[in-house]
Amino acid sequence: MKVKMQVYISGTRNGEAWPAAGGEVDLPDAEAAKYCANGLAIPVRSDEADVETRDDKPERKKPGPKPKT
């Protein structure tokens, strides 16, 4: 899961320096979830086809014609 870091973490991860606050990094889902749950990162929206999405918006109906008086 790709996340956007909200804070800077010093040191390295797998030999790579952590990105600065505001930078993005791809992490395993479980690890990313922990960082997000602790407020250290936020998920980055992905437009990839293999990403499952959830639509919470209620279906909107178009208004019908106004009744004649």
Image (cartoon, rainbow, N blue to C red):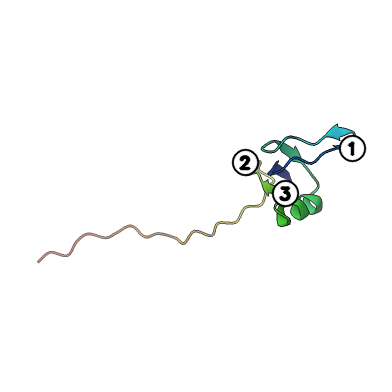
Q: Earlier in the sequence, mark 3 or mark 2?
A: 3
Q: Are the two marked residues, 1 and 3, in contact with CB atoms closer than 8 angstroms?
A: no
Q: How crowded is mark 3: few (under 14 residues within 10 Å), some or many (20 or more)?
A: some
**What residue is rendered at 62% in x and 41% in y?**
47
Q: Would you name the residue on which mark 1 appears?
A: 14
The correct choice, above or below, for 21 with respect to 38 in the image is above
Judging depth in this view, the residue of 27 and 8 nearest the camera is 8
* Picture disc at residue 47: 2
**What residue is rendered at 66% in x and 37% in y?**
22
Q: Are the two marked residues, 3 and 2, in contact with CB atoms closer than 8 angstroms?
A: no
Residue 2 in percent (x, y) is at 72, 42
Q: In this view, does 66 lie to the left or right of 60?
A: left
The correct choice, above or below, for 64 with respect to 51 in the image is below
Q: Earlier in the sequence, mark 1 or mark 2?
A: 1
Judging depth in this view, the residue of 19 and 57 nearest the camera is 19
Secondary structure at badge 3 equals loop
**Total numbered circles:** 3
Q: Are the two marked residues, 1 and 2, in contact with CB atoms closer than 8 angstroms?
A: no
Q: Which amino acid does label 3 sit on?
A: Leu
Q: Which amino acid does label 2 sit on?
A: Asp
Judging depth in this view, the residue of 31 and 5 nearest the camera is 5
**What residue is rendered at 79% in x and 44% in y?**
27
Secondary structure at badge 2 equals loop
Q: In which quarter of the image is residue 37?
A: bottom right
Kindly report which numbered mark, 3 or 2, lies closer to the viewer in this rendering.
3
Q: Which amino acid does label 1 sit on?
A: Asn
Give the farthest residue toward the left: 69
Q: Would you name the residue on which mark 3 appears?
A: 40
Kindly report which numbered mark, 1 or 3, lies closer to the viewer in this rendering.
3
**What residue is rendered at 19% in x and 61% in y?**
66
